[in-house]
Amino acid sequence: MTYPVKDTLVWCEIPVTDMDAGVAFYEALFGQSLERDTTGPNEVAWFPKKNAEDVAGHVYPGKPATAGNGPTVHLHAPDTLEKTIERVAAAGGEIQGPIVSLPVGRFQYAVDPFGNSLGIFSKLT
């Protein structure tokens, strides 16, 4: 089967119950500012990306799924996995289990302060 698009993921949306707190958490995770956008039906804050073609996502005001009942969003660690996980914990996230090694990289599960399931991923170089 051939797909006409390069990536199957378009973007992800992560609901937060408090935009300011959500933006602060994800800015701490990435170590970069999120771009707040009020041009749509509700405010969003975009994750950093290198260029317009990159897959990305945003946080928005919403109600997260109950713990363990929603999707897991995997995000690239902007530097090392260990440093990113330290920032997640320092910003109020909860680390879940050990680091998982894969042939293409490593990741660790976490839960953000709003109950969203995250995987923090670091690709092998």
Image (cartoon, helix red, strand yellow):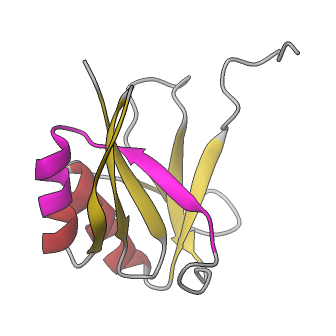
Residue 37: x percent and y percent?
51, 56
Left or right, residue 70 beside residue 96 = right
Q: Quadrant of residue 49?
A: top left
The extreme right residue here reads 1
Taking the spot 32% from the left edge, 61% from the top edge, the residue there is 26
Q: Which residues are magenta?
A: 70-86
The image shows residue 118, relative to residue 65, as above or below, that is above
Quarter of the image that includes the C terminus:
top left
Residue 109: x percent and y percent?
36, 61
Q: Quadrant of residue 104?
A: top left
Residue 69: x percent and y percent?
64, 78
The residue lying toward the viewer, choosing from 63 and 106, is: 106
Taking the spot 59% from the left edge, 59% from the top edge, the residue there is 13
Q: Is residue 48 magenta?
A: no
Taking the spot 67% from the left edge, 59% from the top edge, the residue there is 40
The image shows residue 79, relative to residue 88, as above or below, that is above
Q: Is residue 44 at all visible to an observer of this figure?
A: no
Taking the spot 56% from the left edge, 78% from the top edge, the residue there is 68
